Amino acid sequence: MWRQFWRKVQRITAKILTEPSLRRWLFACVIAVGILAGVGGYTFFYAEGPSYLSDDPKSCANCHIMNSQYDSWQKSGHHAAAVCVDCHLPTSFIPMYAAKAMNGYHHSKGFTLQDFAEPIQIKPINSQILQNNCLRCHGPMVDTMLPGATTDRDAIRCVHCHRAVGHGPPAGLGRTDQGLAKEMPRGVVLPKSFRQKEPK
Amino acid sequence: MTRETPSTSRMRTALIVVLGITAVVTAAVTLLLVNIFERKSEAYAPWVRFEKVDEDTTDPAIWGRDFPRQYDSYQRTALPTQTRFGGHGGSEALPEEKIERDPWLKRMFQGYAFAIDYRDRRGHAYMLTDQENTLRLTKPQSGSCLHCHASVMPLYRKLGDGDAFKGMDATHKMSYTETHQMLKDMGHLHPVSCVDCHEPASMSIRVTRPGFLRGIAEFANSSQGAPFAPSIEQWRKGNKKRPYDPNRDATRQEMRSFVCAQCHVEYYCSSEIPLTFPWGKGLSVESSEAYWNALKFPSGERFFDYRHAETGAEILKAQHPEFELWSQGIHARSGVACADCHMPYMRDGASKVSDHWVRSPLLNIQRACQTCHYLPESEIAARVDVIQERNYNLLQRSGAAINDMIDAIVAAKEQGVAEAALQPVLELQRQAQWRIDYIAAENSMGFHAPQEAARILGDAIDMARQGENMAMRLSRGCPTTAPVPAESPATPETPDASPAPADGADAEVPAEAPAVDTATVAGNI
C-alpha cells in the first residue's frame, strides 16, 4: 500500500514538473511557503518564542501583565526555592507541556485580543496544579494536618492562608518604610543627601 | 494508470488552493507580528512632546495633545456618576438639593448661604461651572473661593509680583466676581488642570496651593502623630531649620495624597482673613475645632463662620474634610494614598497609566479594591455598603438631635431665659453642629475612617441631647449641671515627637488684615 502511494506521489510530481502551466503555480506556491516560513520564523523569535520552552521566570513577564507577580516573587520567601513553573506547572513531561500549551494559548489569545478580565485570577485547574505542587515539597510535613482529599473543590488550599509565600505582599501595601535612624545598622555610611541628624 | 493520476486542471486548482491558504496564514502571522510590535512599543511607554507647556499653560487640552491617555480619562469627569450615597445620576441640568432631602441640614445652616443652595456633587469638570451658578453667589462671596475651583496660580503670581503666597493673601479681600473676572481676562478660567498637580518640565507630581503648603507646614510643627505621612515624622526628628515642604520632603506615595489635600479639606475661605487650613494643632476633628476656637478675627472677636439665625449661636461651618478623615483611618495608616483608590493604575495595552477619571472607587472596584483585597466584587461592595449605611443612620439620628436641640433653645428664648444662662447651650450647639457637619459634608459617608466617623457622630448626638436637656431645664427654671466634655482627641500624641512650639493660635492671625463687621461674615460662603 505504501509503495502504491509513493508511486502516485512520484507520478503527480513528474506531471507537475513536466506540465509548464502547473510548474508556474508550483513556483508561486514555493515562494509563498517560503515567505510564510520566513515571516513565521521571525515572528516566533521576535515574540521571544524560544524563551517559553525554558523555565526562566523572566519569560513569564515578557508581556508585562505579570510584572507585579514577577517583582513580588523576587522579594518573596520562595524566591530562593522555586521559580514560576515549579509551582504553576505539573512536573511530569506530558502534563507539563499540556498545561504549558493550554496556558500559552489562553494567555496569547487574551493578550492579543485584549479581552481578559482584570485583575487576573487563577483558573480552577491551575489552582489544583498549584496545590499539588505545595504538597509535592511540603506534603510530608503537612499530611497529618489535612483532614480530607485536597482535590475536593471546597478543600482549603495552602495559599488561602499562606498568600504571600509566592508573590510576597501586594505591591504598594505595608506601611511606608520610614528609614528612621533606629532601623539603620550602626556604622553604615550613607551618601550625604541621605544623612539624617540623630534624634536626641 | 491515467485513471489514477488527477487531471491537469484539478491539480492546478489544488495548487491554487494551497497558495491561497498560505497567503491567508501569512497575512494572519503578519498581523500577529504587527500586534506584538505595537505591544512592545507600548511597553517602552514613549511619549512625543508636540507642545511646550509651562507654569502658565492652564488649558488642559494643550497638555492633552502630549498625554492623550491621561487627558481622555480626565475628560470623563464630566460624566454623571452615582453611588448609593454620593454623586448624582441622570441628565438633569443640576444635581438634587441636599438641603431639601435632609431638612435638618437646612435648619443647621439658617443664617448662612448654604441654607439657600447646597446640592449633590458633580465631577471635577463641573467644579467651576457649578460654583459660577450657585445661588450662594446672591450673597457677597470672597475671592478666596477660587483657590480650589479654578486653575488660579497665574493670578496669584501676578497679584503677588511672583510670590503666590502674597498673591493669595490679596484675594480674600476681593470679591468673588472681581477675582473671577481677573482670571477670565488672563485667559486662565479652567477647572483644576494638569499644571495644578504636575511640574511642567518633568511631569512629576507636586503641590502648588499656598493654603495647603502653609497648612501642612503648620501641622508638621504640631505634636500630633502623623502615621499617614512618615516624611513628616522624619522631618520632626531633624533640625527643623527649614519649614516642612512637601515638594522637597514628601515621598512620591505621600504626594499621591497631598495633591488631593490641596482642596479636599476643611478650611476658612471668607473675607476676614486669608484662606486658612486649621491644622496648626493637628488633623483630628478636635484639633481643628481647638484651632478655630483659639483664632481671633482682626476685630478681636472669637472666630466663627456665621451666627445661627434662630438661636444666635456662633457656628463653625465644616467644609469637606476628606483628607483629615482619611488621615484618621486604617487605609491611611497602611500607606494607601488617595490616588490608589480614586485614580488607580490601569493597563492600556502594555502600558500603565493612572486613571485620571477621579471618581468613587465603588464604580471601579476591580482596580480600586481588588488589587489588595482578594474578594469577589459583590462581597467588597456589600462590606462598604454596611459601613456607609451605619454611618448614614447615625447621621440621620444626629440630624434629629440637632433639630430637637434648636427647638429647645428657641422655646427657652421664648420663655425669656437670659442670654447669659443660655451661653453653655449655644456652646454645645456650636460643638455638636461642627461635628455633624464634619461628617455630613465629608464625601465618603464615613468610609474614609468608619470608627472615627461613628465616634464623632456619637459625641455630636450626646452634645445635642445634653444641650436640649439643658435648654429645657432652663425653660422650667430647673437647676443645670455643666456639660460633660467629649473624650480626648482620637490620635494620641507621638511620644517621641518633639513638643509643639509654644506659638499659640493667636499668632496665626495676620496683623495687617483689616477689621470687618461680623455681620458680613454671616452672609459669606
Image: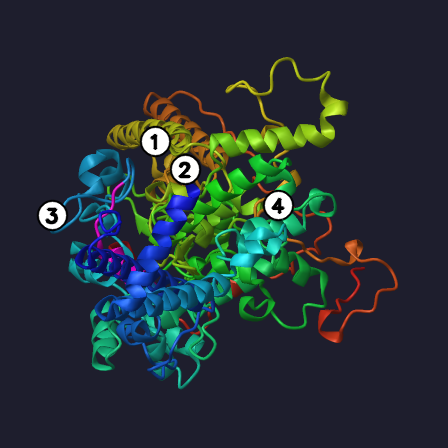
* Residue at image mark 2: B446
Q: Is residue B144 above or below residue B159?
A: above
Asked if badge 3 and badge 4 are on a common chain, one would say no
Residue at 33% from the left image edge and 67% from the top image edge: A32
Q: Earlier in the sequence, mark 2 or mark 3?
A: 3
Residue type at mark 3 is Glu
User: Does the residue at mark 2 contact the one at mark 3 (Cβ under 8 Å)?
Assistant: no
Q: Quadrant for the C terminus of chain B, please.
A: bottom left
Q: Which residues are magenta?
A: B70-82
Q: Is residue B208 left or right of residue B5?
A: right
Asked whether the residues under the numbered discs 4 and 1 touch, taking CB atoms below 8 Å apart as contact, a structural biologist would say: no
Q: Are marks 3 and 1 on the same chain?
A: yes
Amino acid type, residue under disc 1 in the picture:
Tyr
* Marker disc for residue A84: 4
Could you say where residue A21 lies in the image, as x and y percent from the top left? 21, 69
- Depth order, front residue of B303/B476: B303
Residue identifier under label 3: B92
Chain holding disc 1: B
Confirm whether circles 2 and 4 share one chain: no
Q: What chain is tagged by disc 2? A: B
Vertical placement of residue B420 versus B343, above or below: above
Closer to the observer: label 2 or label 3? 3
Please tell me if label 2 and label 1 are on a single chain.
Answer: yes
Residue on which disc 1 sits: B392
Camera-side mark, 3 or 1: 3
Give yes or no for residue B80 being in the magenta stretch: yes
**Magenta-colored segment: predominant secondary structure:** helix
Q: Quadrant of residue B383?
A: top left
Q: Amino acid at mark 2?
A: Gly
Instruction: Confirm or deny contact between disc 3 and disc 4 (CB under 8 A).
Output: no
The chain that hosts pointer 3 is: B
The quarter of the picture where residue B128 lies is: bottom left
